[in-house]
Amino acid sequence: MFGLDNKVAVVTGGASGIGEAIVQRFLKAGAIVYSIDLVNASIEGAISLLGDVSKEADIERLLAQAAAATGYIDILVNNAGIQPLGIPFSDLTETTLRRTFEVNVHGVAFGVKHGPTFMPERGGRIINTTSFVGIIGIPLGSAYAVSKAAVVQMTKCAAIELAAKRITVNAIAPGTVLTPAVTNIPNNPEIPFVSSRTPLGRLAKSAEIASAFHFLASDEAAYITGAILPVDGGITAGWERYDLPPPDPHM
């Protein structure tokens, strides 16, 4: 069940964080896995391809390279992204907004555009990485949260366009994850802040996010497309706390 034996998978941003966990999970499930990143993936068995997802020519070239051995790609995970949080609209710069969209939105769009070219007639899987902040509003998310909301809508539009080719397009919306980007910040206030507002009371592990990608990449998920799957401990389901005094029973 959920086997990926001999499936050809490409994971962008596969050298670290969630992407690295996805690569490891796919390899264990039997897939042939290519990582597209700015640096080599240090994962035994993974095949590293170096490139910048914000450049369409890089995406097209590297997908063709990954498909060269077998002639096709079964699974494309558009995961690469940057995370400029903490920026109010009053401090937003043209440079920050442009770079965030180039990586987080254009990179996904180029994958969606060129990935199907290399997928077999039997169909394939495209899985995008969005975020819980692409679903709910947050303060200081002028660039990052907005870019991830764009990925949500792109996933739905692509699912409709590619259905006739038997290509499913879905997205995973992780909560805050215990990746080095989070844990390497000394006394990071984000950890207790988000944990206290998450119904399950903790942040996610990368492996927990990767398991959801594994499911959507598998044959068992063949009838799921256009879905946005939150893997966030329940934070998008609603507030974990609502600290109001109870109403007066005599009123």
Image (cartoon, helix red, strand yellow):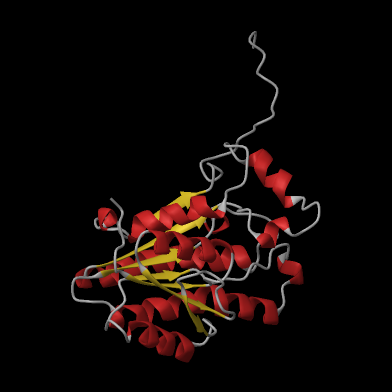
In the foreground, 203 or 150: 203
Q: Is residue 14 left or right of residue 183?
A: left
Q: Is residue 189 left or right of residue 174?
A: right
Give residue 218's position: percent from left, percent from top: 30, 58
The residue sitting at 63% across, 10% down in the picture is 249
Against 56, residue 250 (above or below) is above
In the foreground, 30 or 112: 30
Report the number of discs: 0
Q: Is residue 47 left or right of residue 197?
A: left
Against 191, residue 166 (above or below) is below
The residue sitting at 56% across, 79% down in the picture is 40
Q: Is residue 80 left or right of residue 179?
A: left
Residue 2 visible in image: yes
Residue at the extreme right: 186
- Which quadrant does the C terminus fall into? top right
Against 220, residue 30 (above or below) is below
Residue at the extreme top: 250
Give residue 108's position: percent from left, percent from top: 46, 74
Give residue 163's position: percent from left, percent from top: 24, 68
Tell me where residue 82 sits by quadrant: bottom right
The residue sitting at 72% across, 51% down in the picture is 190
In the foreground, 142 or 85: 85
Tell me where residue 179 sits by quadrant: bottom right
Against 218, residue 46 (above or below) is below
Give residue 146's position: percent from left, percent from top: 57, 65
Residue 227 visible in image: no
